[in-house]
Image (cartoon, helix red, strand yellow):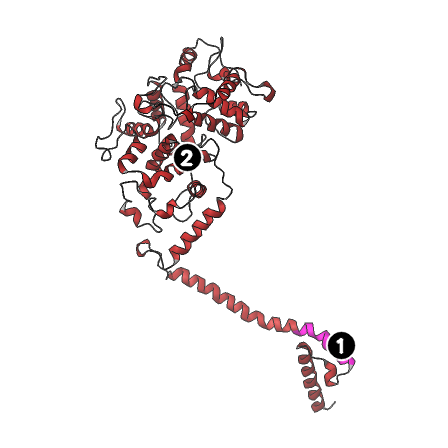
């Protein structure tokens, strides 16, 4: 074959292939049918060849991109020092996103019906915890944030700002419970203790209207810290400096006399040494969850737990706290008579149809059976705590002492109304109602409590 003719045919075939690859029609050039078929068969092979040619540049581009990332990482040209502050617009973008996150994710939050954010005791509890866990970063009424904290990036905001006040209750709850990543704001310590967070929300709702001296009274009660009330810190005789400081922290919520500051926290005075020591051990080990108590109990040594338990067990208990701590009850706070009667019946008889044993069998005793020393005294405790703990035992894991499983089993059949009734009944009773029975149990004169 003539070489010139062959070269011409080759060029013509290439032109046809280009035309076919570009969507043209071989018939427009007068190409025979078999040539069109051959061009169609060659198209996939030609495309694969094109991709093979492109593969090398893509690999080179990927390698260059990886190399660029490595060089930027090693050179660290972006200054992330907290001292220089945020880059323009970054703080606004992050803060706006945080507000939107809180708004969206808190949509399904529901406040328990037994939580009253206007309850002064709940506000006091929130103030006591705030002084322990929040004031160091956010400041407090009459106390500015520490200069060291203000150099954090992002800096913890002052809670007196109008922007913080504009958060809804649910949004404040969501932020306190979950914390905010990359801001040094931790989540709540106690797993499954969402009930505690509402105390912080109650306090934050009042924050803007609290005067400095009122804050000191809310957070410290009778125990005035040095430099904040003018009176200096109280001393609890017989305790070394470290444990004395711990008792002062405890007294902010439980009261100097251990009587709970009128519902701010559970009453501890006169509880048995065995129960108090086991409960503190549970908090310290994390088996008993509480965002309020775990940070206090975790640093305690075994000897300090024993001495702290002995301190509160030896405090005299009484039915009524001091006059300053026991204002007259408002009419709205008086428990419903029908609820009290129902609670009394369940405490004495249980509810066999729902497999609920009588509470008094363990916590009060009857006949020859007296309560174990490891069981707490619940008569005279604030209804809010009784209701919260019964719900915790019924609805989820609430560990603690070796007898926690007893309460899990006992509370499974309780309805919401029965829980309210038991809380109403036991809170209406004098706090020292169980003292005699417990002392008999400690002396060994009584039979063991039933296994339920």
As drawn, the label of residue 117 is: 2
Percent across and percent down for residue 150 are 30, 49
Give the structural element (helix, strand or loop) at label 2: loop
First reached walking from the N terminus: tag 1 or tag 2: 1
Q: Please state, as top left, top right, bottom left or bottom right, where the N terminus lies in the image.
A: bottom right
Q: Is residue 37 left or right of residue 174?
A: right
Residue labelled with disc 1: 37
Comparing labels 1 and 2, the label whose residue is closer to the camera: 2
In the rendered image, the vertical position of residue 347 relative to residue 216, given as above or below: above
Start-end of magenta stretch: 33-46
Is residue 121 or residue 442 the one in the foreground?
A: 121
Q: Is residue 276 above or below residue 131?
A: above
Magenta highlight on residue 382: no
Q: Residues within 10 Å of mark 1 (few under 14, many from 20)?
A: few
- Residue 184 visible? The answer is no
Residue 212 appearing in the image: yes
Name the outermost residue toward the right: 33
């Amino acid at each position: 074959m003539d070489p010139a003719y062959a070269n011409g045919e080759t060029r013509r075939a290439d032109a046809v292939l280009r035309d076919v690859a570009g969507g043209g029609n071989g018939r427009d050039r007068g190409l025979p049918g078999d040539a069109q078929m051959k061009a169609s068969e060659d198209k996939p092979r030609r495309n694969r060849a094109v991709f093979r040619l492109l593969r090398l540049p893509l690999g080179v581009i990927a390698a260059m991109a990886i190399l660029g990332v490595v060089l930027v990482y090693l050179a660290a040209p972006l200054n992330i020092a907290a001292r220089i502050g945020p880059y323009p617009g970054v703080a606004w973008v992050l803060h706006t996103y945080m507000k939107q996150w809180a708004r969206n994710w808190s949509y399904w939050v529901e406040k328990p019906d037994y939580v009253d954010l206007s309850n002064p005791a709940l506000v006091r509890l929130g103030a006591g915890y705030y002084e322990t866990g929040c004031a160091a970063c956010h400041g407090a009424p009459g106390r500015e944030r520490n200069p060291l904290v203000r150099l954090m990036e992002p800096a913890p905001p002052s809670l007196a700002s109008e922007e913080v006040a504009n958060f809804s209750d649910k949004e404040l709850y969501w932020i306190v419970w979950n914390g905010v990543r990359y801001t040094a704001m931790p989540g709540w310590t106690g797993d499954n203790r969402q009930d505690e967070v509402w105390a912080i929300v109650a306090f934050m709702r009042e924050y803007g209207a609290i005067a400095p001296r009122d804050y000191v009274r809310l957070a410290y009660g009778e125990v005035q810290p040095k430099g904040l009330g003018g009176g200096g810190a109280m001393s609890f005789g017989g305790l070394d400096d470290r444990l004395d400081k711990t008792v002062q922290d405890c007294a902010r919520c439980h009261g100097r006399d251990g009587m709970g500051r009128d519902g701010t926290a559970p009453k501890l005075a006169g509880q048995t040494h065995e129960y108090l020591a086991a409960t503190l051990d549970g908090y310290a080990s994390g088996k008993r969850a509480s965002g309020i108590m775990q940070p206090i109990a975790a640093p305690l040594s075994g000897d300090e737990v024993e001495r702290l338990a002995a301190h509160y067990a030896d405090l005299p208990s009484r039915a009524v706290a001091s006059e300053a701590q026991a204002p007259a009850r408002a009419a709205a706070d008086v428990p419903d008579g029908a609820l009290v009667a129902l609670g009394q019946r369940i405490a004495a008889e249980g509810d066999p149809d729902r497999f609920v044993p009588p509470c008094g069998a363990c916590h009060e005793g009857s006949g020859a059976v007296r309560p174990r020393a490891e069981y707490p005294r619940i008569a005279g405790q604030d209804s809010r705590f009784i209701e919260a703990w019964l719900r915790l035992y019924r609805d989820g894991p609430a560990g603690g002492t070796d007898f926690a499983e007893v309460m899990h089993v006992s509370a499974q059949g309780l309805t919401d109304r029965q829980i309210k009734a038991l809380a109403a009944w036991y809170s209406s009773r004098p706090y020292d109602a169980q003292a005699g029975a417990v002392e008999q149990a400690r002396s060994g004169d009584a039979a063991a409590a039933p296994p339920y």
